[in-house]
Amino acid sequence: MRAAAASLTRIPFSALRPQPPENLLALYADVHDGQALIPDLKMGIGALTVQRWDPAHAAAGWTLYGADLTLDTGHPFGSMFYRNDADGRVLRIGVKWHPPVQQLEFPALHPSKPELTSDCTAAEVAAVVLDARSRIGTIVAINAQIGSFVATKESENAILDASGLGLERLSEDDPRLARDA
């Protein structure tokens, strides 16, 4: 029982609501190795204005007609399906996070087999992959914007620390910044 209690992190109720109920001082969360607790998020905002996807990045001659996407621990994962407007060919673009190189990958796949496509030119694949990247980039940007909107200074610091960026924050008028310019 002591080992389980050691992994619990204390969250003050004031981080969750303005007035804690009487006789309750903290909420406990089970935080495992490799996880980080992000406290003090502002919730309850009804709407947020975000930047929409720019159709200027659409692949000419191809129409997105379906997608099977999810966020797997914050990383987009799944497939996007495009149909060629002229001849009806289908191109499936995979969306996956590649941990060893820490980047999203967009392989051009056969519509129904687990293999790379063979009936599209390199130029067609490049245009459709750019379309897919721009749409997924919009999802990632919107999720980040929502996250930064609900974050407070304390939760921003916890997010930066969990990301390996827990550096000292400097104000814009800090003289040390002038030396670095």
Image (spheres, helix red, strand yellow):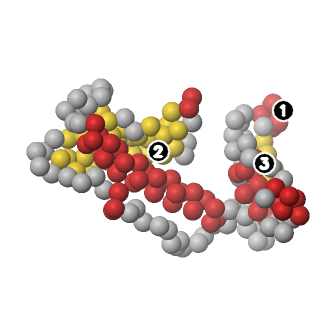
User: Which label sits on residue 176?
Assistant: none
Amino acid on which disc 3 is placed: Gly
Q: Are marks 2 and 3 in contact (CB under 8 Å)?
A: no
Residue tagged 2: 76
The quarter of the picture where residue 41 lies is bottom right
23 or 33, nearer to the observer: 33
Identify the residue at horizontal 42%, vertical 66% (top origin).
Answer: 52
Quarter occupied by residue 24: bottom right
Closer to viewer: mark 2 or mark 3: 3
- Find out whether the residues at labels 1 and 2 contact each other: C-beta distance under 8 Å: no
Q: In this view, does 87 lie to the left or right of 39?
A: left
Rendered residue at 25%/46% (across/down): 82
Tell me the number on the disc at residue 2. 1
* Mark 3 burial class by Cα count in 10 Å: few <14, some 14-19, many 20+: few
How far, Cα to Cα, is label 1 from label 2? 37 Å
Circle 1: residue type? Arg
User: Could you tell me residue 133's position as x and y percent?
Assistant: 41, 48
Q: Which percent across, then down, holds residue 138?
A: 45, 57
Asked if residue 10 lies left or right of residue 129, the reply is right
Of the pair 168 and 15, the residue shown nearer to us: 168
